[in-house]
Amino acid sequence: MGRDLTAEDRELRALLGDVDTIAVVGLSSRPGRPSYEVARYLQRHGYRIVPVNPHETDVLGERAYPSLRDVPASPPIDVVDVFRRAEHTPEVARDAVAIGAKVLWLQEDIVSEEAAAIATAGGLDVIMGVCIRHVRERLLAEDREKP
């Protein structure tokens, strides 16, 4: 069964350390959009980004796919990072379970108990309502402050 990791920095640090590929659902090709800025940040810090948006063909030099189920199985998706309104997230959660992702991450201000329940029942860890970029930056800053 998956877990809700929002409160456990130790687990978040381990999780982010084990991530290679992040599917960004709702990724826009427009600079200045939160999804674009976060995906660009992640890409610049060594993560492979897979854009998922039926209205895009290419974002940040990566081919975009209309849905998670259209993404090739290799390499596997570790994290599904979601920039969609909460009412769309249960469907994304079902797709994340179907493709065998490890984590469903709903971005800042996106909370869906239904999506969390679907993902958790499917064995995914769930993080809701916080920005993956902000979490990574905060954890890195804390690591630098340690003696």
Image (spheres, rainbow, N blue to C red):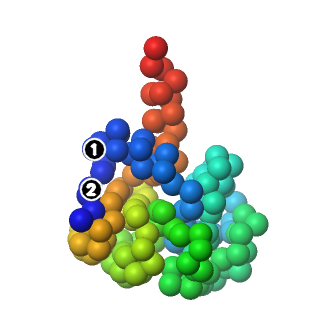
What residue does disc 1 label? 7
> Which residue is drawn at the image coordinates 46% and 36% (left, top)?
138
Q: Position of residue 132 (x, y in %)?
A: 47, 51
Residue 55 visible from this viewpoint: yes
Asked whether the residues under the numbered discs 2 and 1 touch, taking CB atoms below 8 Å apart as contact, a structural biologist would say: yes
Q: Residue at x 49, y 46 (%)?
A: 17
Residue 128 position in % (x across, y down): 34, 58
Q: Where is mark 2, residue-wise?
A: 4
For the point 48% across and 63% down, the residue is 78
Q: Is residue 112 visible?
A: no
Instruction: Measuring from the top left, give residue 76's x and y in whole percent.
Output: 53, 70
Q: What kind of residue is marked 2?
A: Asp
Could you tell me the amino acid type at mark 1?
A: Ala
Q: Going by the image, does 12 lie left or right of 72?
A: left
Residue 124 picture quarter: bottom left
Residue at image coords 68%, 49%: 44
Residue 107 percent across, percent down from the top left: 43, 59
Total marks in image: 2
Could you classify mark 2 by the number of other residues whose Cα lies within 10 Å: few (under 14), some (14-19), or many (20 or more)?
Answer: some
Q: Secondary structure at mark 1?
A: loop
Q: Residue 56 sits in which quadrant? A: bottom right
> Is 110 displayed left or right of 75 in the figure?
left
